[in-house]
Image (tube, rainbow, N blue to C red):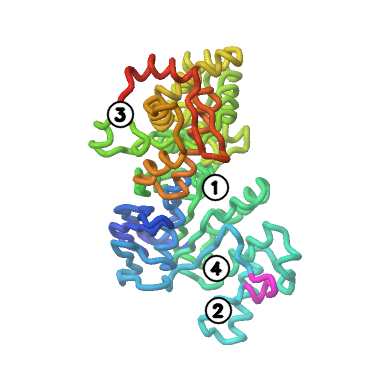
Amino acid sequence: MVTGDPANAPLLQAEHVAKSFPSADGSTLDVLDDVCVTLHEGEVVALLGRSGSGKSTLLRILAGLIAPTSGEVRYRGELLNGANPGAAMVFQSFALMPWLTVQDNVELGLRAAGVPDRERRDRALAAIDQIGLDGFQNAYPRELSGGMRQRVGFARALVLQPDVLMMDEPFSALDVLTSENLRGELATLWERPEFPTKCICLVTHNIEEAVLLADRVLMLGTNPGHIRAEVPILLPRPRDRRSPTFEATVDRLYAILTGRDEKSAAERAAAPGPLTHPLPSASVGGLAGLVQIVYAHGGQVDLPDLADELSFQVDDLMPLLDAAQMLGLLDVESAQAFLTSTGHDWYTADIHRSKGLFAALVVAHAPLVNTIVKALENSNDGALRDDFFRDLLSRGYSRDDTEKQLDIAIDWGRYGELFDYDADTGELVLSEVAAGLAEDLLGPAGDV
């Protein structure tokens, strides 16, 4: 590792960066908003957040692969326009050229930079040896395991001797044992004085990975992506997963990640609606499974332990937790999930009562389901086309997110027997159960 004074050695700075993309329906999708990041010499920084928080987009902006919509990025004080000359990338998908040998793949960046043949060969072989693939320089990617192919990706980046090594979830495509082995080897290489890079910036959704590798963790929130928190990891290297300090740090990050994103004052003051309170991406079966697990653990589980036990990633667990909290089935405090009395009643009820309870909960707490039931109740014959709700949702969501929201609402509503849905005609029809339930929970019929 190249040492330096972090306070006086900024390598890369993003100042008030925002990024938007045009959607297929003509609207604009805001991915990042007012993001400020500084990377220093001698540190590993992890970008941690849920899916949709813009982690990978931010990494590509720092690498100069895409331009920000607003704000600016500076490398060693110079405004970045185009690819960052001091950065190299390691991708999740390996991104190797299958028709090239290991050595040829590693030499690609050097060849593009015009490095002479002999120097290019010597540097490539040294990098191949450094990452543990000596003897495989003439092999093709198809002859290598996933872990070995990712090692080639590391060698191809490190041979450029970049100031900043950028990694976009480099271990997520690997099996558990291989990814754990590569994390350990990377941590060991980072500690060596001859490691040919000054800083590492890592995108991950794995909390333990962030604590194992990083000196700082930048927590990103969503809608759009923004920096929610910056957490220093004050643990000596090498790091021990079993230490109380390690576990406490993991718990702290879980507590931040499971907390709801901050809302504007206007959003907090407004009544919950389909556009301000989207439905989490969770099926009824997934919700039932999570509640069952918490029930089986005596009504309380430690989320890091649960994720580890079930081989979950953070992104797998968060939508289910969000949905369970939205419906009042679970409470989440810090890194602990607790079964509520409502969750207990729902899980222990027979199938008919369970469906009735679920129907009442989604009408009361899931804004889009509430809107659908209300609209059907106000229609002449208790029936409406799905395009009516699709048009309403398109005011606040992209086309893909509109379809996802509608699919979740239909799944929840059909399970609770609130309405029927004909996928061929796109028609939703209010059920007799929902007609009485809507009157009890929603009050007299009114405008949607």
Which residue lies at the image location 49% right of the left edge and 42% below the top edge?
404
Q: Position of residue 131 (x, y in %)?
A: 63, 63
Helix, strand or loop under label 2:
helix
Q: Amino acid at mark 4?
A: Leu
Q: Nearer the viewer, mark 3 or mark 2?
A: 3
Which residue lies at the image location 33% right of the left edge and 22% below the top edge?
445
Q: Amino acid at mark 2?
A: Leu
Side (left or right) of 196 relative to 105:
left
Q: Which residue is mark 2?
A: 110
Check if residue 104 falls in the magenta segment.
Answer: yes
Q: Amino acid at mark 1?
A: Pro
Q: Mark 1 Cα within 10 Å, few/some/many (few <14, many 20+)? A: few
Side (left or right) of 215 relative to 238:
left
Q: Quarter holding the C terminus?
A: top left
Q: Earlier in the sequence, mark 3 or mark 1?
A: 1
Dot 4 and dot 2 residues touching (CB under 8 Å): no
Q: Mark 2 Cα within 10 Å, few/some/many (few <14, many 20+)? A: many
Q: Which residue is mark 4?
A: 158
Check if residue 279 falls in the magenta segment.
Answer: no
Q: Nearer the viewer, mark 1 or mark 4?
A: 4
* Res 238 label: 1
Q: CA distance from mark 4 to mark 3?
A: 62 Å
Side (left or right) of 64 relative to 244:
left
Q: Over which residues does the magenta segment extend?
A: 97-105
**Residue 77's quadrant in the figure?**
bottom left
Q: Earlier in the sequence, mark 2 or mark 1?
A: 2
Dot 3 and dot 2 residues touching (CB under 8 Å): no
Q: Mark 3 Cα within 10 Å, few/some/many (few <14, many 20+)? A: few
Side (left or right) of 337 relative to 150:
left
Residue nearest the observer in this picture, 209 or 223: 223
Helix, strand or loop under label 3:
loop
Q: Which residue is mark 3?
A: 447
